[in-house]
Image (cartoon, grey):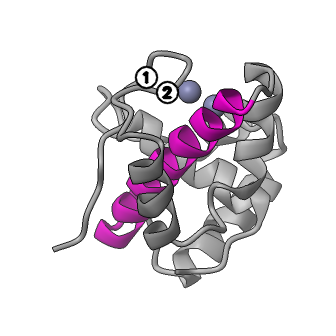
Amino acid sequence: MTELTKKERDCLVDLGEKEGGKFPTRLVDLAADLSIKSPTALNLIRRLEAKKIVVHEKGMILLTPSGTKFFHEIVENHRVLETLMVNFGMDLEKACALSESIDFQIDHHSIDKMFIKLGKPGKCPHGRDITQFHEK
Ligand SMILES: [Zn+2]
Ligand SMILES: [Zn+2]
């Protein structure tokens, strides 16, 4: 699993959520979404480019296939983790925030095991789908 910082994770998730939208994400949109300045956003994009997670061409920022895969894994990890925490009594808001800080650091195999132990929940506590994402 590629090592990311929390900011890089937030950047990847923002880009992933926008993929399939009408227009490709531009640097200014990304900077606005993450509440950071454009040079800071550019710096983040360069780091993600070096990790082969995004390509930045003609002002458009796109995820690479491995970036897309990583994004899907983070989303699934996030939803499984918050489901686990809420099942054990944590408030959803806290569980969601805590999941954000670790969802990009946990290997997918461990998440799969938790998912099975949880009884393969179809949705997270927000009601969003938990789509099992497997590389084959
Ligand atoms: Zn959440
Ligand atoms: Zn959720």
- Residue 80: x percent and y percent? 52, 43
Between 4 and 24, the one lying in front of the other is 4
Mark 1 is on which residue type?
Answer: Arg
Magenta region: 59-88
Residue at coordinates 58% horizontally, 33% vertically from top-left?
83
Q: Main secondary structure of the magenta part?
A: helix
Q: Is residue 122 above or below residue 68?
A: above
Decide if residue 20 is on the left or right side of residue 37.
left
- Residue 135: x percent and y percent? 24, 70
- Location of mark 2 (residue): 124
Say whether residue 15 is magenta: no
Could you say which quadrant of the image residue 48 lies in? Answer: bottom right
Disc 1 within 8 angstroms of ligand 2 (CB) = yes
Say whether residue 85 is magenta: yes
The picture quadrant for ligand 1 comes to: top right
Residue at coordinates 25% horizontally, 63% vertically from top-left?
134
| Callout 2 crowding tier (Cα within 10 Å): few <14, some 14–19, many ≥20 | some
Indicate the secondary structure of the residue bearing disc 2: loop
Q: Is residue 129 above or below residue 16?
A: above
- Location of mark 1 (residue): 128
Disc 2 within 8 angstroms of ligand 2 (CB) = yes
Q: CA gap, disc 1 to disc 2? A: 5 Å
User: Pointers 1 and 2 in contact (CB under 8 A)?
Assistant: yes
